Amino acid sequence: SQQGEEDPQALSIQEGENATMNCSYKTSINNLQWYRQNSGRGLVHLILIRSNEREKHSGRLRVTLDTSKKSSSLLITASRAADTASYFCATDSGNAGKSTFGDGTTLTVKP
Amino acid sequence: DAGVIQSPRHEVTEMGQEVTLRCKPISGHNSLFWYRQTMMRGLELLIYFNNNVPIDDSGMPEDRFSAKMPNASFSTLKIQPSEPRDSAVYFCASRTGYDEQYFGPGTRLTVT
């Protein structure tokens, strides 16, 4: 199975609400990344958090990493309809630049 | 930089035909990845190159699939012969070290 597994598989919220997605992984990592994919498009990198970091912010995004639990969360605050997309976590664990992607969380933000 | 460039963007072909997908990574990136995405199987890593050398091709589904990277600025993914179950969106991505991956727009392949 994939190294990273997102939870939930699908999330539907109203505009203005916060959205939280979780990612669990199995082995030790160097870093963890979150990507977004709009329908029919390629993945776009959102944020990278290294294994020695616990929290990182970028605009309305907040990512946490708990290496003891092998888990990460992505929080999108004050969501907008334009945030509707699939969100993937990807882990790097020492294989010459290879990332392992999870199955993604599909977020729907209703206007 | 124009980002990762893939061609063609759409390909429709008949079963049994050869298909060649092309990718130009971002200049200076030393790793290149080929992925396949379908509704059923999600995003699958097919093969990746580091400094033009194939490192891990364990995701290549069958011998019908082959990939090359003759130089740092070009890679191809070939399917010969193609089958309807190969229909998917194929993405190329590149990166340097453990920095973020930059994905191309993808090639939507339909095999009839």
Image: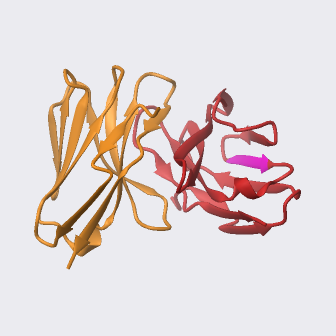
Chain colours: A orange, B red
Q: Nearer the viewer, residue B69 or B12?
A: B12
Q: Which residues are magenta?
A: B74-78
Asked if A2 appears above or below B20 in the picture, the reply is above
Q: Nearer the viewer, residue B80 or B22?
A: B80
User: Residue visible at 25% across and 26% down?
Assistant: A70
> What is the quadrant of residue A7 in the picture?
top left
Quadrant where the image shows the C terminus of chain B = bottom right
Q: Is residue B98 left or right of residue B4?
A: left
Asked if B81 appears above or below A97 in the picture, the reply is below
Q: Is residue A48 left or right of residue B14?
A: left
User: Residue visible at 66% across and 47% down?
Assistant: B73
> What is the quadrant of residue A51 in the picture?
top left
User: Residue visible at 15% across and 32% down?
Assistant: A54
**Would you say the magenta stretch is mainly helix, strand or loop?**
strand
Percent position (x, y) of residue A9?
33, 51
Q: Is residue A86 left or right of residue B60?
A: left
Is residue A59 a member of the stretch shown in magenta? no
Q: Is residue A72 left or right of residue A18?
A: right
Is residue B76 a member of the stretch shown in magenta? yes
Percent position (x, y) of residue A67?
22, 24
